[in-house]
Image (cartoon, rainbow, N blue to C red):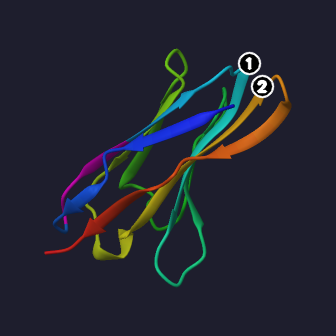
Amino acid sequence: QVQLVESGGGLVQPGGSLRLSCAASGIIFRINVMAWYRQAPGKQRELVAAVPSGGTTNYGDSVKGRFIISRDNAKNTVHLQMNNLKPEDTAVYYCKLDCSTSRGWGFYWGQGTQVTVSS
């Protein structure tokens, strides 16, 4: 069973920064895509950023130039550096992992971490 534990959320003023982390545990054979999504109240969950194994990172249009996703393959961890945060970035942030285990390929979600941008 794969478990994802997110950390780093909180309250920050507009223009500030936060760094989210997501660590995966369990018997994981191979990880393909590691990604961050977010969901604001009353809105659909949307892609924030994704980093495939050996591929090009992908960002949502609203965060390009402000957020940076990175992964540490040795630790099965993905990070999201969020800079110049805006009130519209307020949401619950979820990490998602596409990986293979003894059960085959599948995707897994973290429990979510709240990010609130407010003065």
Label 1 crowding class (10 Å Cα cut-off): few <14, some 14-19, many 20+?
few
- Front residue of this view, candidates 54 and 93: 93
Tell me the quadrant of the picture where the N terminus can be found: top right
The residue that appears at 85% across and 29% down in the rendered structure is 103
Amino acid type at mark 2: Thr
- Front residue of this view, candidates 87 and 25: 25
Dots 2, 1 in contact, CB < 8 A: yes
94 to the left or right of 2: left
Amino acid type at mark 1: Phe
99 to the left or right of 45: right
1 to the left or right of 76: right
Residue 44: x and y in percent read 60, 76
Q: Secondary structure at mark 1?
A: loop
- Front residue of this view, candidates 37 and 4: 4
* Disc nearer the start of the sequence (2/1): 1
Query: What residue would you read off at disc 2?
Result: 101
Residue 111: x and y in percent read 51, 52
Tell me the quadrant of the picture where the C terminus can be found: bottom left
- Front residue of this view, candidates 50 and 8: 8
Distance, label 2 to label 1, CA atoms, is: 5 Å
User: Over which residues does the magenta segment extend?
Assistant: 15-20
- Specify the label residue 29 is tagged with: 1
